[in-house]
Image (cartoon, helix red, strand yellow):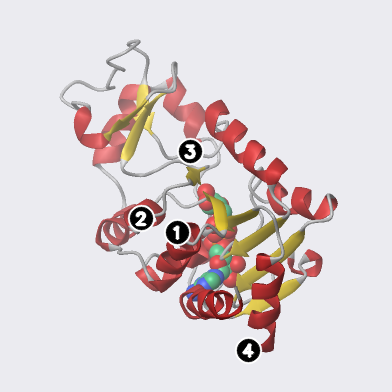
Amino acid sequence: MKDIEQAAKLILNSAYVLCLTGAGISVESGIRPFRGPGGLWTEFGEPPMDGYQRLLQNPKKHWEEIARRGSRDSEFVRALGEAKPNPAHLALAELEQLGILKYLITQNIDNLHLADGSYHVAEIHGNSQKLRCVRCGNRYAREAISLEILPPQCPRCRGLIKTDTVMFGEPIPKDMLRLCQRETDKADCMIVVGTSAFVYPAAGFPLEVKQKGGILIEINPYATEISPLCDILLKGKAGEILPQLVVSIKAIR
Ligand code: APR
């Protein structure tokens, strides 16, 4: 595909390549996206936007509800548990190993980038396998915190423990936001994979790269909010396009 070769050249001519991924990169791992064709929310409708406020008002009730999750979340939770990295994740891990991809910001909570050996990863919406203290921000593996007594307390500061996954209405943890902004400030090229580019602040990062004259390369079967800004739109599935992009980069470099 000529466009893939063109994208490979733009990437190799850039000084600091960043990648932003969304739910679409995990569709070929069996995890449904939220929006668009096959989207969880396209089928079930969006969840309430005040989850975080309700958690703070009644943490014990929130944790008891987690145990009594409905069919929608159990389908999603089951897919999370069974999912494995797909060729798209592996292609990005290879670009990192080649020293071409400097950092990866993901909106996904599925842990699949870390599972495939990617190291420089910022999980801006958290990780479903972790818990986090609302007060001090410390993160813990799920198994490190007892759920005998609800709501669980932070071993470090006795603050309220919640899932690391960022809830609607919850601010992005400051450490994570600083990391993503630091990386975006350095980027002169961003590969945007599998995101509808609706949700901020993540959706703002490609705009910032573009505004300072950087390159945007989008990989998505469909056009999105930011497609008009992209230098190249590689239309197709991430699991098919990204491996081809890696082959093209290795052939040229
Ligand atoms: N390869 C690449 N992209 C794909 C594929 C695929 N195989 N299948 C679908 N897509 C694209 C869709 O066209 C869509 O643009 O992935 C995108 C998924 O969009 P969303 O479901 O909105 O997911 P995302 O953009 O990550 O949502 C951002 O919103 O719901 C919150 O916190 C949640 O992190 C999520 C955030």
Query: What type is the residue that disc 2 sits on?
Result: Gly
Mark 3: few/some/many CA within 10 Å (<14, 14-19, 20+): many
Q: Which residue is mark 1?
A: 97
- Is the distance from the Cβ of mark 1 to the nearest ligand 1 atom less than 8 Å? no
The reply to whether dot 4 and dot 3 touch (C-beta < 8 Å) is no
Mark 1 to mark 3: distance in Å? Answer: 29 Å
Q: Quadrant of ligand 1?
A: bottom right
Front of the two marks 4 and 1: 1
Instruction: Tell me the crowding category of disc 4: few under 14, some 14 to 19, or many 20 or more residues within 10 angstroms, Cα based.
Output: few
> The N terminus is located in which quarter?
bottom right
In front of the other: label 3 or label 2? 2
Q: CA distance from mark 2 to mark 4?
A: 28 Å
Q: Is residue 88 left or right of residue 77?
A: right
Instruction: Provide the residue designation for mark 2.
Output: 117
Q: Residue furthest top?
A: 157
SS for tag 3? loop
Q: Is residue 199 visible?
A: yes
Residues under numbered marks 2 and 1 in contact, where contact means CB atoms less than 8 Å apart: yes
In this picture, is 204 found above or below 40? above
Whole-percent x, y for residue 243 in the image: 48, 77
Marks 4/3: CA–CA distance: 38 Å
> Any atom of ligand 1 within 8 Å of the CB at mark 2?
no
Q: Kindly indicate whether the residue at mark 2 contacts the one at mark 3 (C-beta within 8 angstroms).
A: no
